[in-house]
Image (cartoon, rainbow, N blue to C red):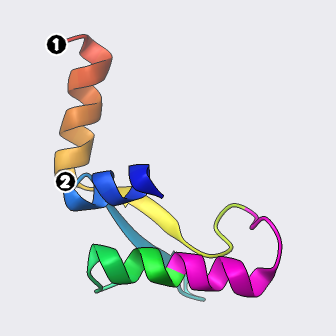
Amino acid sequence: MSLIKKTLDNGLIQAGTFSEEREFQIWDLSTKKILARIEREWDNLGREPNPGEIVWFITTEKGDKEANRLQSGE
């Protein structure tokens, strides 16, 4: 959760889910509320979630630039 917090706080990723039409719906929540939602939904599952079962993450433009910078070894 600390990695999720750090990357959300730094604007590198966004959290959300996919609609039935397969459109990404960004959660318009603070980092604190995103983390609380993930924890609450995970607790309600009572087991390890499957990928995408609670939340999906997408990179932001800033996150893409940082990933490219790291890959190029800068």
Q: Which residue is mark 2?
A: 10
Rendered view: 12 above or below 70? below
Image-based side of 50 in relation to 55, left or right: right
Q: Residue at x 36, y 84 (%)?
A: 33
Residue under the image location 46 percent in, 81 percent down: 36
Q: Nearer the viewer, residue 51 or 21?
A: 51
Of the two numbered discs 2 and 1 in the rendering, the one whose residue sits closer to the viewer: 2
Three-letter code, disc 1? Glu
Instruction: Determine whether the residue tagged by mark 2 lies in a helix, strand or loop.
Output: loop
The image position of residue 48, as x and y in percent, is 78, 64
Q: Is residue 6 left or right of residue 42?
A: left
Where disc 1 sits, the SS reads loop
Residue that sits furthest to the right in the current view: 47
Examine the image and state in which quarter residue 41 appears. Answer: bottom right
In the picture shown, does residue 28 fall above or below 73? below
* Rendering quarter of residue 43: bottom right
Mark 2 to mark 1 CA distance (whole Å): 19 Å
Residue at 30 percent of width and 52 percent of height: 6
- Looking at the rendered image, the quarter that the C terminus falls into is top left
Q: Is residue 14 magenta?
A: no
Question: For residue 7, which numbered disc appears in the image?
Answer: none
In which quadrant of the rendered view does residue 72 lie? top left
Residue 40 highlighted magenta (yes or no): yes
71 in relation to 73, above or below: below
As drawn, is 22 to the left or to the right of 51?
A: left
Amino acid at circle 2: Asn
Q: Position of residue 1 (x, y in %)?
A: 48, 58
**Residue 74, numbered label:** 1
> What secondary structure is the magenta-colored segment mainly?
helix
Which numbered disc, 2 or 1, marks the residue that appears first in the sequence?
A: 2
Q: Residues within 10 Å of mark 2 (few under 14, many from 20)?
A: few
